[in-house]
Structure formats: C-alpha cells, structure tokens
Amino acid sequence: MDLTYSTEDEAFRSEVRTWLEDSLSGEFAPLRGRGGPGREHEAHDERLEWDRHLARHGWTCIGWPTEYGGRGLPLFRQVIFHEEYARANAPGRVNHLGEELLGPTLIAFGSEAQKQRFLPRIVAVEELWCQGYSEPGAGSDLANVQTRGRLEGDQWVVDGQKVWTSLAHHADWCFVVARTEPGSQRHSGLSYLLVPMHQDGVDVRPIQQLTATSEFNEVFFTGARTDADLVVGEPGNGWAVAMGTLGFERGISTVGQQVGFQRELATLVEVARANGTYDDPVIRDRIGKATVDLEVIRLNALRTLSEAQAPRQASISKLLWANWHRSLGELAMQIRGTASLTAGEGYDLDDWQRLFLFSRADTIYGGSDEIQRNILAERVLGLPREVNRELR
C-alpha cells in the first residue's frame, strides 16, 4: 500500500484542519477533549449538537456513497479527516455506532427501503443506534446467542437479554442478533433485526464501571416488537450480516485513534519530565518502547485498510492497540507513583486514573485477546481448532 499523500490530499488536509479550528471555537470550544471511550458521560447533549453541526456542513459519513448522503471520499481523504479530527482534540462522536457500523452494514446488506428509511437519519444525526450482540452467555462467543425472535403476523417479537450494550440509554434503535429458527444452533438460524428502543418491551439498565461511569448497559427485551421487514439480509442468515458489521468496526476511524494515543503518550512524557521520573532508565526504556510500538500500530492500521490485508490485519490490529493502551495506563501509574493511588473526594478520578481503569477493558470489548488469537491461529495460519470448541 502506497502511503504517500498527494498535493491534492494535503490541500484537503489543510481544508479539514482550518474548518475544525474555526468550528472548535466559540460555543464548541469547551468540547475539546470531551467524550470518547471511558468518558461517554461527558457533555453528551452538547456533543450531540456538535455531531449535528458536522452533519450540517457535510462532515458526517464522508466515505459513504453520495447516493446515500455521504461524500464518497476516497480512502486517503477519509484517513486524513480522522487524523486531523484527532489532532484537533475534537470531542468523541455520539453518532459513531450508526455512522461506522450500522450504516455501512445497511449499504452492504440492507434492502433499498431500509436504506431510504434509516441512512438519511444517520447522516443527519437524527437517530442514534446501539449494538445488541453480547449476552451473559454469549460474549466473545457470539454464536451462542439465546435471544429469541419469532414472527407474529407483520411483526417480529423479541425476548432475551443483551449486556455491555454501549450507549443503549441514549439510543433510539438497536441492531439485534437474535435466534429466529427454533432448534437452531451456533451460526445457523440467526437474524439481524432492527429494533426500536422506545417501547414498553425494552428495559435498559446501566452498568456501573470501575470508573464510576455507566456507558455500558444491560438491555432486556420482553415481547419487544419491530416490523417484519426490519430484518437485514435474509432471515436465518444473520451471522453473515453480523460478521460484516464487525468488519466495519475496525475501519478507517482507528487511524485517528492512533493520533489520540500519540497525544496521551506525549502528555505522559511531560508528566515524567516534570516529576523527575524520566531520569529513571527503566521508565525511559518503557517510554522508548511505547513510542516505537505506537509507530508499529500506526503502520499496521494503515495496512489494515488494504483490502487484501484486512482479514488478518484486523485481528492483529486489535491485539496491538488494546495491549498497548492498557500498558500505557500501567505506565502512567508507575510514573505518577503514590499520587496515582488516591482518588479525589467522592471518587473523583483524574485522567490518568480513568485511563488505567478503563483501559483494562480494551483487551476484552470488541473481541477479546483470546478470541483474536484463535481467529489468527485457525483462520489465517490454518492451525487445528481448539480442543472441544467449535470454530467461532
């Protein structure tokens, strides 16, 4: 993959950088650095308005085809936008589950009626989405889904429980993997349903995390209903659609994630210099390793965008960045020493404490380390399946 930016690409970078600088002033200036993983509770309503500001100026869904409301930007332009967005320390996006997961899934697998119904509202940030995948007995082993869906007349009726559902308490809709063929097992008999959240049959219960925030939720479906035509793809073929969504999950926005990691590392180096721990050769060695490893992650993320490399690189990328970020949280605690052990009044965590605690989850959500290694071993390297375990 040629990683060279053209003159036109750099002109586009200047356009994005200028627009963000102008827009993140005035009323939106306080939103810099707010939100994102582990901080989704911060200024939600204000960040929602920021997302709608992006939409009004054509900066949402920039890689989508123009016929579905996007800008149809080529790969490098999308990378540039996400890099500059991160460099501007712009706020965490409220609409990312719709824009980065459900939208591309509908473009790839949805009916024309579904595209016309949902895509314009995602582009305009008028409807927010959450992901109904994980269950108490089906986390990384998604094929063990037990949530049921049955067709009654012109509606699906859904019963079951989902867990670790990000932002369900703000969502208008949920894309739900449910078992719709009685007696089916594992990958067969699953369907990908679009379920409205604002109905009596849906109960959302926030899960308090180590950070004392609650961006994850349990979601209980008890006779929840959705229209019969709101199944994406063919009924019973939901596994293929669900895997398609997971492929989009590790897309272009991860390049911007690396820029955010660079900022965190640079800020931590400043802390080490200020408190003298940078003079410790062990600390300095860990900082050097983190710097080199982050460059490897960045290059690997760019390779992931190459279609030929995507299947293997997606799992490698998740392993690399998740473990790097968790290690950064541990390094932050080591650099700050005893100051890292005490929270403020009322369990008021500082940014480094929050990073340390929340990054423990990085190696679990979105596919645990164990699952990623099994995928690489079995599907990429062709090694024998794990004993007594079906290929997930």
Image: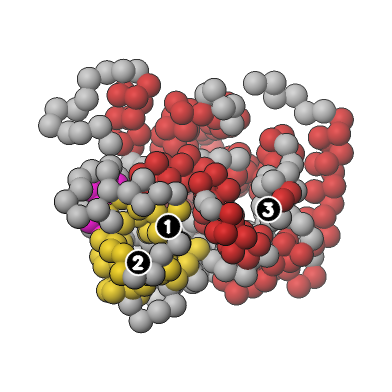
Q: Which residue in the structure is indicated by mark 3? A: 68
Q: Which residue is drawn at 28% across and 36% down?
A: 392
Residue extending furthest toward the front: 153
218 with respect to 348 (left or right):
left
| Residue 297 appears anywhere in the view | yes
The residue range painted magenta reads 141-147
Q: Which residue in the structure is indicated by mark 1? A: 231
Q: For marks 1 and 2, give the CA distance.
A: 9 Å
The front one of 380 and 237 is: 237
The front one of 342 and 377 is: 377
Residue 127 within the magenta-colored segment of the rendering: no
Q: For marks 1 and 3, give the CA distance.
A: 19 Å
SS at mark 2 in the image: strand
Q: Residue at x 20, y 45 (%)?
A: 185
The 10 Å Cα crowd at callout 1, few under 14, some 14 to 19, many 20 or more, is many
Q: Which residue is drawn at 22% across and 20% down?
A: 384
| Residue 207 appears anywhere in the view | no
Residue extending furthest toward the bottom: 200
Say which quadrant the N terminus sits in.
top right
The 10 Å Cα crowd at callout 3, few under 14, some 14 to 19, many 20 or more, is some
The 10 Å Cα crowd at callout 2, few under 14, some 14 to 19, many 20 or more, is many
The x, y position of residue 32, in whole percent, is: 67, 61
The relative height of residue 345 versus residue 14 in the rendered view (above or below) is below
Query: Callout 1, which amino acid?
Result: Val
SS at mark 3 in the image: helix
3 vs 2, front mark: 2
Residue 156, numbered label: 2
Give the mark nearest the N terminus, 1 or 2. 2
SS at mark 1 in the image: strand
Query: Callout 3, which amino acid?
Result: Tyr
Give the mark nearest the N terminus, 3 or 2. 3
